[in-house]
């Protein structure tokens, strides 16, 4: 009998998952790219975090020990493109470390700095200096969407030119520095035909963990679910036939997917995390900041001067699945793993509420469940056959 | 199911709940248009609705009075208009509290007493005066968003004092009711304001709102003109079932004011910390009051005890009382 599970497809948990406070600093609202599926619809050059604002926010977070009780913290730097502001980030990180040490705060011994970057500046001297200085506390995720065709379909410069070549050249150095890194792939309607080859391509590049999700907005066209399912089934065949499940992971496939609901937990962590913008305003997550929203005004929880309005947190901290889901979701036989984004829900709701779940993804989720079932049933049979053959 | 309609006859009608009225302009021009009043009355008649008319402090034209008389109704009037409109519910403001002489003529009144935070220290003395003259007092605490720990403690002490007075009055044949102390005694389920579910409001602009506060406070959009199919988007969020905090709570008398919820927490179904703390201070006062009543051997012996609890805000226990999907569906 094999001593350990050979199937790695489901990936690994993130650092201190569920036990750390996640604080997102939106260091800039600017980005070199204009990705077509990006939820940040209001990119601009003026929204830049000032060091003094970041200091105030950190002081507030460290001071509120009774309110913010997590013993670990992930400071997530996001944009726009965060590495545009690497010098500022460096100062903010230094300040955090110094203050956490002075305060004898548990976070001093348990922190991560996390980045989601487009990777265009990864080779930059300033970025590399920052990485050298903080390497043991860093998680960096470069977003590369797959093949050149898939990537350049969505991730383009303002002039429409694709960014694949400028990102891919930085991938080897990134993987050398952070061998276990993952990337996050986003799928919109137009790039469904590229899913299979994109996942395989990323694995070939050496990125062993591919986290992939479809956009939460209402972009889906008739037949997208069927095309999506075909891509995933085809990918499943390739993974099984070539035993790629032994070395690689892809978040499309999960054993916990496609069951009736067993608990009443909210899917999204908005409100348990915190986002800080350049004015020092606090939000439940970046998806509630003005430049992320298409229809609604920003939903703020407070700011670094006056603190968090705890009344505004109450709905986020008590929100459960049942209170926001239509009956068809609660009765759904394949509900588990069906994702939603609280910010996207808020933006598309009929009233200003986080208690109305958008169901744009229903057909896409069901397609994913069918492909996922196909994958696990077929893999299970193959593993049994392999086992019998060995014995 | 709708049971009654609130009709705000004027911009300057007596506010009877947590909102503030608008400054009075021209008394004639700030009236609900006569045509809108007629629509409201007909709507009420067609839908078997009782009507609560909110009166301004000036007299209405005959045409208004004639229309009002066409439907079963209750008048809610400012204290100053009590002689013009006898047998009405009177609204008394703590910052314009009537002089002793003005209270003399009162007898078995039904009163809404709106207490400003600044007047919290006078609560028991004011209530002691009113309780002698009334059969029921609905207490409305204004400015609750500004309440802090000291205010909660002061409110608790004030209710304790009032409770002693109520206990003495309980020996009377028809003892007075005080909403925040006596309502909880006989309740075994939530009995809240139910704006949008049991009642709607016609505002002075002739349009429908969830309640007057949504007109005056501008916390939400109008529901449109008076018509049969009233579109209330996300109406289900007004129901108890869809409030994760309230559905596990047994402060049954709480108003669950959806306007204050929206104002303070940004969600109609989520009560603020202040709302919960105040309702639990009242719940505890009711619990102790009931105990004393039973010890005194009065009528309430048949009422079920109110359990002692260790929290002052159900938000503190939501995690431990989270419903399963199956239990949620049963609600």
Image (cartoon, coloured by chain):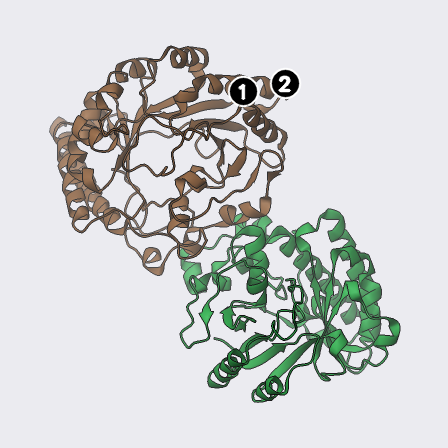
Q: Which residue is mark 2?
A: A102
* Image-quadrant location for residue B236: bottom left
At 38% from the left and 55% from the top, the residue drawn is A325
| Chain letter, disc 2 residue | A
In the rendered structure, the answer to whether residue B64 lies left or right of residue A370 reads: right
In the rendered structure, the answer to whether residue B267 lies left or right of residue A247 reads: right
| Mark 1, other Cα within 10 Å: few <14 / some 14–19 / many ≥20 | some
* Image-quadrant location for residue A36: top left
Which of these two is toward me, A240 or B243?
A: B243
Q: Position of residue A169 (x, y in %)?
A: 24, 16
| Chain letter, disc 1 residue | A
The answer to whether B62 is drawn above or below residue A170 in the figure is below
Which of these two is toward me, B196 or B8?
A: B8
Q: Which residue is mark 1?
A: A109
Which of these two is toward me, A365 or B189?
A: A365
Report the chain shown in green. Answer: B
């Amino acid at each position: 009998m094999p001593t350990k599970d050979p199937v790695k497809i489901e990936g690994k948990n993130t650092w201190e998952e569920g036990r750390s406070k996640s604080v997102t600093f939106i260091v800039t609202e600017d980005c070199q790219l204009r990705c077509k599926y990006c939820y940040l619809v209001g990119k601009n050059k003026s929204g830049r975090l000032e060091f003094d604002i970041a200091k105030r926010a950190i002081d507030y977070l460290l001071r509120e020990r009774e309110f913010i009780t997590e013993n670990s913290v992930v400071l997530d730097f996001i944009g726009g493109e965060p590495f545009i502001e690497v010098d500022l980030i460096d100062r903010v990180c230094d300040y955090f470390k110094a203050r956490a040490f002075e305060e004898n705060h548990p976070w001093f011994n348990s922190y991560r700095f996390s980045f989601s970057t487009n990777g265009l500046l990864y080779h930059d001297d300033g970025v590399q200096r920052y990485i050298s200085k903080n390497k043991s506390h860093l998680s960096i995720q470069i977003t590369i969407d797959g093949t050149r065709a898939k990537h350049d379909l969505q991730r383009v410069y303002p002039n429409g030119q694709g960014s694949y070549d400028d990102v891919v050249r930085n991938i080897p150095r990134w993987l050398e520095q952070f061998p276990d890194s993952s990337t996050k792939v986003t799928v919109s309607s137009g790039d469904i035909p590229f899913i299979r080859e994109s996942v395989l391509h990323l694995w070939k590049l050496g990125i062993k963990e591919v986290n992939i999700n479809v956009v939460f907005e209402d972009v889906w066209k008739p037949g997208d679910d069927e095309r999506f399912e075909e891509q995933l089934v085809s990918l499943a065949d390739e993974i099984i036939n070539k035993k790629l499940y032994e070395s690689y992971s892809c978040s499309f496939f999960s054993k916990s997917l496609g069951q009736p609901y067993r608990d009443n937990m909210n899917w999204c962590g908005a409100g348990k995390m915190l986002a800080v913008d350049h004015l020092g305003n606090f939000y439940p997550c970046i998806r509630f900041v003005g430049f992320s929203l298409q229809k609604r005004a920003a939903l703020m929880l407070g700011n670094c001067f006056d603190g968090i309005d705890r009344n505004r947190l109450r709905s986020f901290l008590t929100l459960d699945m049942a209170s926001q889901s239509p009956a068809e979701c609660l009765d759904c036989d394949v509900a588990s793993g069906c994702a939603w984004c609280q910010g996207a829900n808020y933006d598309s709701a009929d009233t200003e509420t986080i208690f109305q779940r958008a169901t744009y993804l229903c057909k896409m989720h069901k397609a994913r469940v069918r492909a996922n079932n196909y994958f696990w049933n077929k893999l299970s049979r193959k593993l049994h056959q392999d086992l019998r053959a060995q014995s | 199911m709708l049971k009654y309609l609130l009709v705000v006859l004027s911009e300057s009608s007596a506010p009877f709940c947590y909102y503030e009225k608008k400054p009075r302009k021209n008394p004639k021009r700030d009236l609900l248009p006569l045509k809108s009043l007629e629509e409201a009355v007909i709507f009420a008649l067609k839908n078997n609705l009782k009507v609560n008319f909110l009166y301004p402090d000036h007299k209405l034209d005959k045409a208004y009075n004639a229309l009002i008389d066409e439907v079963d109704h209750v008048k809610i009037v400012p204290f100053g208009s009590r002689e013009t409109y006898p047998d009405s519910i009177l609204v008394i403001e703590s910052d314009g509290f009537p002089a002793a002489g003005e209270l003399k003529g009162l007898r078995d009144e039904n009163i809404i007493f709106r207490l400003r935070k600044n007047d919290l220290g006078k609560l028991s003395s004011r209530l002691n005066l009113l309780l002698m003259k009334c059969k029921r007092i609905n207490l409305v605490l204004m400015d609750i968003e500004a309440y802090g720990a000291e205010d909660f403690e002061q409110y608790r002490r004030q209710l304790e004092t009032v409770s002693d007075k109520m206990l003495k009055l309980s020996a009377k044949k028809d003892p007075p009711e005080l909403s925040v102390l006596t309502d909880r005694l006989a309740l075994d389920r939530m009995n809240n304001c139910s704006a949008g579910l049991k009642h709607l409001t016609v505002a002075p602009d002739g349009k429908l709102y969830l309640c007057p506060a949504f007109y005056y406070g501008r916390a939400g959009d109008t529901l449109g003109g008076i018509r049969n199919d009233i579109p209330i988007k996300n109406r289900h969020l007004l129901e108890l079932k869809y409030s994760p905090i309230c559905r596990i709570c047994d402060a049954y008398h709480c108003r669950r004011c959806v306007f204050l919820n929206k104002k303070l927490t940004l969600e109609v179904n989520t009560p603020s910390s202040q709302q919960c703390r105040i309702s639990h201070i009242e719940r505890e006062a009711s619990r102790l009051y009931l105990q004393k009543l039973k010890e005194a051997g009065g009528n309430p012996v048949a009422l079920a005890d109110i359990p002692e609890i260790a929290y002052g805000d159900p938000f503190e226990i939501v995690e431990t009382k989270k419903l399963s999907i199956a239990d949620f569906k049963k609600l």
